[in-house]
Amino acid sequence: MPNHNINVYYSAITSYLVLTMFITRRERFSAAHRLFREDWTDEKNLEVFGKCSNPNWHGHNYTLFVTVEGEVSHETGFVLNLKILSSLIQNKIIDKVDHKNLNIEVDFMKNKIVSTENIAIAFWEELENDIIQSGGRLHCIKLVETENNFVEYFGK
Ligand code: NI
């Protein structure tokens, strides 16, 4: 095949191939929490949860990565419009948690131990349906609590 035809062939192939890709949006928020069980003494909570059980709360600067899987649209070249994903995360998550106390001010964390794991699971549940309706599949919630600690949840 002569070289000048390569682009023609490339266009022909990509116009019917279904290409799957992952896209990720990062958002950041700051929030307070306390790791504790009401049915344990402060001593027991301190023993299990360490400094994070401080009865007077403490805060973290969290970084959230939301990864969506989908097919690259032939019409837009997008998996999902990142503006739509961003405003979805903003409305469903960030507006509810940023500069809040996660234990007492956030409806979807009520009666849960506010660990990074449980926050990530709750975020998944908050976002999953809306992402499906936007045409993507939620692949991963990655939540970074400190420089050294983060969790990744894949929905199972
Ligand atoms: Ni903490």
Image (tube, rainbow, N blue to C red):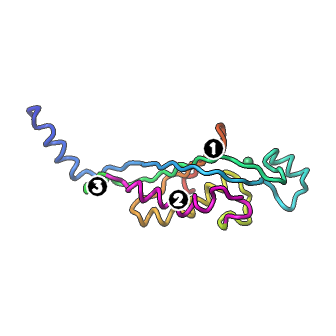
Residue at the image position 65 percent from the left and 51 percent from the top: 30
Which residue appears at 74% of the width and 65% of the height?
Answer: 111
Task: Left or right? Give the position of 99 relative to 138.
Answer: right
Residue type at mark 1?
Phe
The tally of labels here is 3
Q: Which residue is mark 3?
A: 76
- Pointers 2 and 1 in contact (C-beta within 8 Å): no
Tell me, for residue 150, which label it has, or none: 1
Please give the residue where the numbered disc 2 appears in the rendered image. Answer: 90
**x%, y% of residue 3?**
11, 32
Image point 41% across, 63% down: which residue?
A: 134
In this picture, which residue range is highlighted in magenta?
Answer: 78-106
Q: Is 88 in front, or is 75? A: 88
> CA–CA distance between discs 1 and 3?
33 Å
Q: Secondary structure at mark 1?
A: strand
Residue 42 location (% of width, % of height): 89, 53
Query: What amino acid is labelled 3 in the image?
Result: Thr
Residue 4 position, x and y percent, is 10, 34
